[in-house]
Amino acid sequence: MKPYPSSLLGRLSRRLFLVGMVALGGCAEPLVRSQSPEDIAVIESKVRLVGDMVVPYGTNDIRVEAAVLITKLDGTGGDPPPSALRSAVLDEMQRRRVQRPSRLLRSSNTAVAIARGFIPPGARKGDRFDIELTLDRGSKTTSLRGGWMMKTQLRERAFLGGRTREGALRAIARGPIFTDPTDRRNPNLETLKRGRVLGGGYVTKSRPMGLVLKPSVQHALLSKLIGDTINRRFYSTRGGLQVGMAKAKTDTFIELSVHPRYKMNVPRFIAVLQNMPIRESVGERLNRLRLLERQLLDPLTSYTAALRLEAIGLEAVEVLKKGVKDSNREIRFNAAEALAYLDRSEAVPPLAAAARDEPTLRARALVALGAMDALAAHDALAKLLDGTSVETRYAAFRALHFMNPNDLLVAGSNMRGQFRYHVLETTGPPLIHVTRTNRPELVVFGSGQRFNTPLLLHAGGSILLSAMKPGDQVTISKISAGDRDQTRVVPGRFDDVIRAVVSLGGSYADVVELLHEAKQRGVLTAHLAVDAVPHGSQQADRIARSR
């Protein structure tokens, strides 16, 4: 740690003394005894919040990328033109002692691409993220369909001094390439030259995230004080011991771990921390609670007041309970959202109603419900699975799966490592949902769905499905060059058909292509949805932008 000049230490000590006497609530009595609104506002202005003294660190996405070799293409690849990208792939193959690397690049079954991904804030070692693939300019490759991205190391890159400089290793990536099946009828479309490896990136080292003290208040004592303040409010239990979410590493930096309840909403966790009082007396806390109650019940100040009440913790529950009874929709929601992160069942009815009826609040409501442990939240989410809104139903599934991936209501099957397959016993309209982001996943709302016959469908380039007459069973055939053909004959039930396709080697991309073709030909009556997740409202997005 760099030593500070004695004059600077003297100024810091005097400043910290003043902070302790005024801003940090060192007095045993309230600074102002009057209970008028003006005097309470004065007391609130004297209380220093964590956000007054720190700025967040590590709350942005980190972009990582690498040059990568694509294999297993069906004659749609080609030798890439001379470029830095080609050279990087050649160097990597030589480092790995690949035999005849130039010959491999000339194959029509290989290609060179740029692999790029974004590691989110708070990512831990082992977390997965999507990889996007794009071809270099001048590439002869016409399609990435059916390809496989070879193992590659992803690093940060920066363009400095006219040169590209590589940063630290951040992730490892590999896996099957997913291309948009809706465009496969025309192999010349540009979309087939872009692909995605769903969940193909693997974080190799947890991302540091924390709070940096502002230059005017940097001091080891204040760093420790803020860390201790956070740990009294946020901690987890490991081996019977309480472990705080903050650790004062230096006089300028406090390292953070994301509290499990905020795993799906890191921006809110940071916002709540910034709205924590560093220290205040009992009298100041009572007076500030009265002020925050007034602010909570005013639509203009309700949102920030709810965050600050959530930051206080259980002492603020009674005030927030008044908010959920208010006649104003926004006030009810803001109070309920804060109560949800305090795991209070009073939050459930307003949040469930917002998820069902308020599109602009739906995303926030469902994430908040998914953060709870309360049984009432689970039951509310389970009921939302039976609704009519596609976005609400799928987001409710995601929230339940986040709560407990082993819950029998939403637990699924691993389809030979290709994708996760979930069949839900629901009563709403038949719905089938597929993803093009995050992870390969097929979710069926309502068991017993069927394909209509007769039908003639494709699943990828080598699997054919046919049924000649109404009511016929479905014959699924795989035709492989240089190998014996394989056949399965199954009933027309959706579940039987999907499992048979996978048993014949069908990939996730093959299954998605099958579903799109079946929908286009009218032999799949269920609604087919893709990435139907509710979008956050402007107010929700404001957390990430303003903090």
Image (cartoon, rainbow, N blue to C red):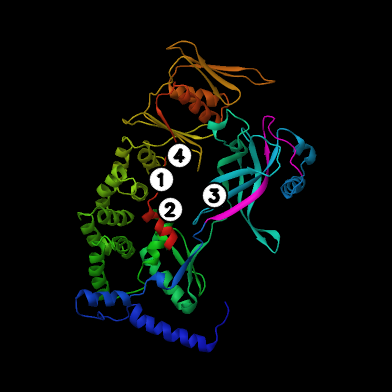
Secondary structure beneath dot 2 equals: loop
Q: Residue at x 73, y 33 (%)?
A: 108
Q: Which residues are magenta?
A: 61-81
Secondary structure beneath dot 1 equals: helix
Q: Say which amino acid is labelled 3.
A: Gly
Q: Say which amino acid is labelled 2.
A: Lys
Q: CA distance from mark 4 to mark 2?
A: 21 Å
User: Who comes first in sequence, dot 1 or dot 3?
Assistant: 3
The percent position of residue 88, horizontal first and vertical second, equals: 73, 49
Mark 1 or 4: in front is: 4
Q: Residue at x 66, y 34 (%)?
A: 142
User: Who comes first in sequence, dot 3 or dot 2?
Assistant: 3
Q: Say which quadrant the N terminus sits in.
A: bottom right
Secondary structure beneath dot 3 equals: loop
Q: Residue at x 39, y 39 (%)?
A: 394
Q: Say which amino acid is labelled 1.
A: Phe
Q: Residue at x 58, y 54 (%)?
A: 63
Q: Does 73 lie within the magenta span?
A: yes
Which residue does the numbered mark 2 point to in the structure image?
A: 263
Q: Is residue 242 visible?
A: no
Q: Looking at the picture, does residue 296 appear above or below residue 382? A: below
Q: Which mark is residue 531?
A: 4
Q: CA distance from mark 1 to mark 4?
A: 17 Å
Which residue does the numbered mark 1 point to in the structure image?
A: 402
User: Who comes first in sequence, dot 2 or dot 1?
Assistant: 2
Q: CA distance from mark 2 to mark 1?
A: 10 Å
Q: CA distance from mark 3 to mark 2?
A: 15 Å
User: Who comes first in sequence, dot 1 or dot 4?
Assistant: 1
Q: Say which quadrant the C terminus sits in.
A: bottom left
Q: Residues within 10 Å of mark 3 (few under 14, many from 20)?
A: some
Do callouts 2 and 1 mark residues in contact (Cβ within 8 Å)?
A: yes
